[in-house]
Image (tube, coloured by chain):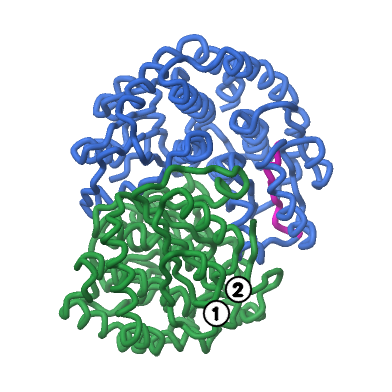
Chain colours: A blue, B green
Amino acid sequence: MAAEVAEQPSVWRRILEDGVPAACEASRRVAQAAPRFVQLAARGTSDHAATYAKYLAEIEHGLPCGLVSPSTMTVYRARPRLADVLHIAVSQSGGSPDLVHSVQVAREQGALTLAVTNDPDSPLATEAELHLDVLAGPERSVAATKTYTAQLLTLHLLFACLDRDGRPPHPQHLAVLRQLPAMAEELLGREGEVAAAAQRYRFAQRLVTTGRGYGYPTAAEAALKLMETCYLSAQAFSGADLLHGPLAMVDPQVPVIAVVPEGPAGDSMGPVLERLRERGADIYGVGSADAVAGTTLGIELPGGVPGPLSPMLEILPLQQLALHTALARGEDPDSPRGLRKVTETL
Amino acid sequence: MAAEVAEQPSVWRRILEDGVPAACEASRRVAQAAPRFVQLAARGTSDHAATYAKYLAEIEHGLPCGLVSPSTMTVYRARPRLADVLHIAVSQSGGSPDLVHSVQVAREQGALTLAVTNDPDSPLATEAELHLDVLAGPERSVAATKTYTAQLLTLHLLFACLDRDGRPPHPQHLAVLRQLPAMAEELLGREGEVAAAAQRYRFAQRLVTTGRGYGYPTAAEAALKLMETCYLSAQAFSGADLLHGPLAMVDPQVPVIAVVPEGPAGDSMGPVLERLRERGADIYGVGSADAVAGTTLGIELPGGVPGPLSPMLEILPLQQLALHTALARGEDPDSPRGLRKVTETL
């Protein structure tokens, strides 16, 4: 897990070097089909990349978007009418039968189907009309890390090309993207700070993560890493949903991780942080200098990163936090109990 | 809370008596608009009713459906293209500004808008083109109970009428619906069993709830009730998602509540229960006699209830369980710490 976390900047360089033409080609096909709705199917970590793509589709492209429950197609044999729908399945392995089935049904029902996987020979990649390889190289750790940010970047490129009718992203946009790997290296280099913070969660049994907008997928993915490696009950809430009920269970004994980057995602967390502070919550902030100053402790992200790119950076210290918290607790993050690398659900 | 839980059968009778014409009229307007995509906006308990409606739309009506993140419209000012979209906002109070805003934007962007609330004079009811009153009467408890099942039944009627082009549900279907209040009374009458089981969770700090398909909204709503009233870290997972990572944190110290009714929702939980038993999990089952026999303890639901109606019954003992667990822990379920009845998020 540690090696794969550290590998992310080089994976991103590979995607920005080799992945752009495929993203453009896929986006050309999508632009031709001119979908009016997007639906995404995914499980686990990939579901958080799908949630990121949902925000991209709705915010940047004005395309209404839904996350599919594969059970509607597999368990209930639903056959929705999917003309003018783009169906995107996201999966590291490309091997889960329910996702493969969702693509088969979506295709039969008239959707344009696109798979985003880390294995071009996988059943999912083969079954979908379009495939994007996230180019992360073999991932051995059960807790997915490099494939997650590779999915984010690949989905980002897809929508960036779609915005330009299948041409590559604007050179200025590409220049910003090309700064990300170096920013990631700088951020990952502050592992010592994160390892020290991890000691704080040595004896925690419960934890809450929260973020809004583009910060929400980060909160969800951080919670999953903590569940997988530290066996904490880590619950992710959108900042708004947290106030609609779950806030009651937050007290000073339940640590909170808040994703508070520059821009709307972080700004909209202001009232949430305020309510959390009223409840005496202990808050670890990941985000802008200003926001982190209002938390118990935290880590500052590089400045000037556009909101839709921030999730790739935000998750890095939180992957490290899960890893170091697991180690501090005497757990082995490389082989979480009860899990296999490829999970097959029907 | 206890009074409002007990009131549910009479609320359902009122809806089946007085609510059918309005559901038919709304469904006629929806049928005229012939939407090709449904999107739902809601928070908290109402979000679980929205999830139920998503399954109804996709499974029974072949309409692809998504849950909206209101932040895309409020925080990011997204203006998605919503022609041919039915936008349904679900809210007990009809008062949260972000939901009202989502309806305003959806309407401007070409969607047909429908509000489902417990207050016909609320801003949400006024802003939407169509409104369905869930007729639950004033709800005073912060933890929503009777408005939840009233939302489920009202949404069920809407889609049942839509299926019949705006005519009332088929008489046979109505006859089945009319059996539900008596079944609910019988089930609620077994409160003693549930109160005894609640003692088991007296000292629990963490808990997992799980279900699939139509059983998933029940799992999500049960977790929220336990968070609101008992301050437990209660996490809901679809059975499939549980296997994709979170399973690692389940051990014999983390109680599990499994929703396992007759039919596909319960049957598809078979492999999930098996994996949970392998991990030594303590499981409280709510469902069919067969499924409950394979759990540590549980409560059997009345037999012969169609899958799409089962969620209205499943939640009843789980509302009681939250209430009695709160009482056993010395908490006051009527005034959860840190919460107000109407939560306003932007």
**Residue occupying image coordinates x 55% and y 61%:** B100
Q: Nearer the viewer, residue A138 or B118?
A: B118
Return the residue at label 2: B229
Residue B275 visible here: yes
| Vertical position of residue B132 compared to residue A274: above or below | below
Q: Secondary structure at mark 2?
A: helix
Which image quarter: residue B261? bottom left
Chain hosting mark 1: B
The kind of residue on which mark 1 rests is Leu
Q: Is there one chain holding both mark 1 and mark 2?
A: yes
| Vertical position of residue B179 compared to residue B51: above or below | below
Residue A146: x and y in percent read 53, 25
**Residue occupying image coordinates x 84% and y 42%:** A293
| Vertical position of residue B335 compared to residue A114: above or below | below
The kind of residue on which mark 2 rests is Thr
Counting other residues with Cα less than 10 Å from the Cα at mark 2, is it few (<14), some (14-19), or many (20 or more)? many
Residue B335: x and y in percent read 66, 79
Q: Magenta residues, as a range?
A: A252-261
Return the residue at label 1: B323
